[in-house]
Image (cartoon, rainbow, N blue to C red):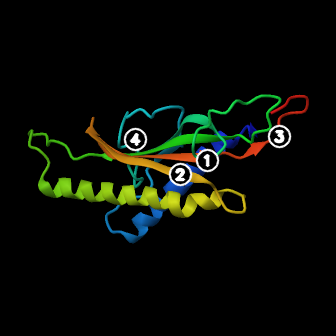
């Protein structure tokens, strides 16, 4: 089966929307927790850690939330990659599975102008924000993302590893991998699958 042309990008946008909405919901119920960052977008490839404050202005939430497409594999038994021969005389049902990476970066506590390290209180606050961000991303994928598919049983996906990032360059954050079964379609007329 062929891959729907817009499926890869639309899936990335759905992931971004779910995570951003869940971060906003978490901020609404947990005092002191920042919401969805002012920089929230689908990016081409691994995101640059240009600035954790995201260049926000006014009351916007600093940070950077990105989703990027990491690659695609053929699967006949989702989520396992298939090594089956695919050809015009073969009717083996093969679908595409895409891997995405959700990355959320926030500012990490840093040295003061006088060269003093961050206090334990600042580090504890940053650790709390990081833990809540990690749980929020997980919850976004478990609770929001399945409903983004029109399929009767919802979006098929596998949660990959989640890990913390940094602190590096003034940033600290969370990276979550997810493998998604993409919707398929028939090959254009005159071509076979």
Distance of label 4 from label 1 (alpha carbons): 40 Å
Residue 37 location (% of width, % of height): 43, 50
Image quadrant in which you'd find residue 179: top right
**CA–CA distance in space, label 2 to label 1:** 9 Å
Marks 2/1 in contact by CB < 8 Å: the verdict is yes
- Residue 76: give x, y in percent of width and height: 67, 43
Question: What residue is shown with label 3?
Answer: 186
Q: Nearer the viewer, mark 4 or mark 3?
A: 3
User: Is label 4 in contact with label 1 (beta carbons under 8 Å)?
Assistant: no
Question: Horizontal placement of 183 versus 190: left or right?
Answer: left
Q: Which image quarter holds the N terminus?
A: top right
Separation of residues labelled 3 and 2 (CA atoms)? 25 Å
Q: Earlier in the sequence, mark 4 or mark 2?
A: 4
Answer few, some or many: residues within 10 Å of disc 4's Cα (few below 14, many 20 plus, some between 14 and 19): some
Q: Using the image, determine if residue 140 lies above or below residue 96.
A: below
Find disc 4 in the rendering and name its residue: 55
Left or right: 183 in relation to 133: right
Q: Is residue 117 left or right of residue 57?
A: left
- Residue 188 at x, y percent in the picture: 86, 33
Q: How many marks?
A: 4
Q: Which residue is mark 2?
A: 158
> Sequence-wise, which precedes: disc 3 or disc 1?
1
- Residue 63 in sight here: no
- Marks 3,2: beta carbons within 8 A: no
Mark seen at residue 13: none
Q: Earlier in the sequence, mark 3 or mark 2?
A: 2
Badge 4 or badge 1: first in the primary sequence: 4
Which residue is denoted by mark 1 in the rendering?
78
**Helix, strand or loop at disc 1?**
loop
């Amino acid at each position: 089966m062929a891959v729907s042309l817009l499926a890869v990008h639309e899936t990335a946008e759905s992931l971004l929307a779910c995570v951003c909405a869940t971060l906003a919901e978490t901020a609404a119920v947990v005092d002191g927790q920042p919401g969805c960052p002012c920089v929230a977008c689908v990016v081409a490839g691994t995101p640059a850690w240009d600035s954790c404050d995201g260049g926000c202005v006014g009351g916007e939430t600093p940070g950077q939330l990105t989703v990027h497409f990491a690659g695609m594999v053929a699967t006949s038994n989702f989520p396992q990659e298939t090594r089956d021969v695919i050809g015009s005389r073969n009717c083996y049902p093969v679908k595409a599975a895409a891997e995405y990476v959700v990355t959320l970066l926030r500012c990490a506590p840093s040295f003061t102008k006088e060269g003093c390290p961050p206090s334990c209180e600042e580090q504890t606050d940053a650790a709390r924000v990081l833990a809540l961000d990690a749980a929020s991303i997980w919850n976004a994928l478990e609770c929001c993302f399945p409903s983004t598919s029109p399929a009767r049983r919802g979006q098929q996906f596998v949660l990959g590893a989640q890990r913390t990032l940094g602190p590096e360059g003034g940033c600290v954050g969370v990276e979550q991998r997810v493998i998604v079964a993409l919707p398929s379609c028939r090959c254009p007329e005159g071509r076979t699958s």
